[in-house]
Image (cartoon, rainbow, N blue to C red):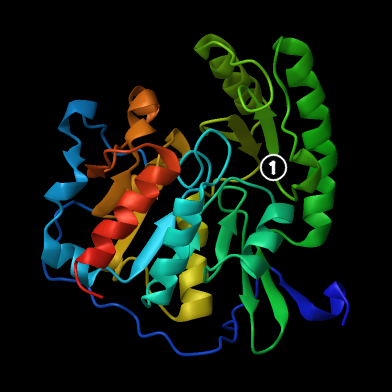
Amino acid sequence: MSTAGRSRERGSGAGARARTGGRLTAPTADAHSSRTPSRRDGAAKSAPSGTLRPLAAMPPAVRARANVVLCDIDDTLSTHGRIPAVAYAALERLTGAGLLVVPITGRPAGWCDHIARMWPVAGVVGENGAFWMRYDAPGRRLVKRFRDDAAKRAEQRARLNAIGAKIIAAVPGCALASDQLYRETDLAIDFCEDVPPLPREAVDRIVELMQAEGMTAKISSIHVNGWFGRYDKLDMTRTLFAEAFGIDVDSARERIVFVGDSPNDAPMFAHFPLSVGVANVRKQADRIATLPAYVTVAEGGEGFAELARSLLAAGR
């Protein structure tokens, strides 16, 4: 069967729930939250980086009731640009223990197609909230849900190409991200992945140029991503869980762990009481609107594996 025959794209008006191989019971929220719900734009007041609590301070009973793990990819699952075996094995162990594992990333649609099909995960949110994808194994098809329809994405692509050329001309040393060809909805400007690291002033200039074009601009650990619209990672996470799993993320937030490292993770850090930063989150702490509640000892993929061990040790 061809890829086209096994895939189904869902437009922004689609309300039908994706078919899954088994039912997942929505987690129940506790009566009391350890953190106040944030504004949806993630612009909650920042906490000083020194107040980050060590992961070991998360109570065992709290870890034991977590049944969803959401994770960034770059510099959270990966270490120095590669996903170590210990991090990939941690994904598989968490999934095998019955937790719902979903990467929430700024990486492109082309990568997310592969992730949804091949990784031991329940689905993926990509391009900072532009879409979700999940593989329906019983139906042998990839299910996709984009915020914008194909015609709108094609129209915006021409604008993104022009803006990208303007930014590259204006900011010496930056480049289109190597994965730009595989993107559907956003513009990614590389400031340290495949180019020598640029100074912060240059990164800020890229953000300013995107915003001057009416774009939303967010900084990750490697790129500045820009897109048209006011959505973020949290918005599409809500959509994925409601449509694919019948879970209200807001009601279930006490049982959901999110782990990340970058400014574009701020809406997720702000929303989930069980938010965790891998140790390298401190490198951009002054740029993150809301810091995570907890932090690992190790950086990157090793930090993610540390979190997985902590959750699994709580009793699975």
Write the residue at 69% across / 42% down: 186
Residue 19 lies, in percent from the top left, at: 59, 87
Q: Can residue 39 be seen in this view?
A: no
Q: Disc 1 on helix, strand or loop? A: loop
Q: Is residue 192 left or right of residue 33?
A: right
**Amino acid type of the residue that numbered disc 1 sits on in the rendered structure:** Asp
Write the residue at 72% across / 84% down: 140
Q: In which quarter of the image is residue 47?
A: top left
The residue carrying mark 1 is 186
Viewer-nearest residue: 25 or 117 = 117
Q: Can residue 211 be seen in this view?
A: yes
Residue extending furthest right?
2
Question: How many callouts does the rendering have?
Answer: 1
Residue 262 lies, in percent from the top left, at: 44, 35
Residue 268 lies, in percent from the top left, at: 38, 50
- Mark 1 crowd level (few <14, some 14–19, many ≥20, 10 Å Cα): many
- Above or below for 297 versus 131: above
Q: Quadrant of residue 17?
A: bottom right
> Which quadrant, please, contains the N terminus?
bottom right
- Above or below for 120 versus 277: below
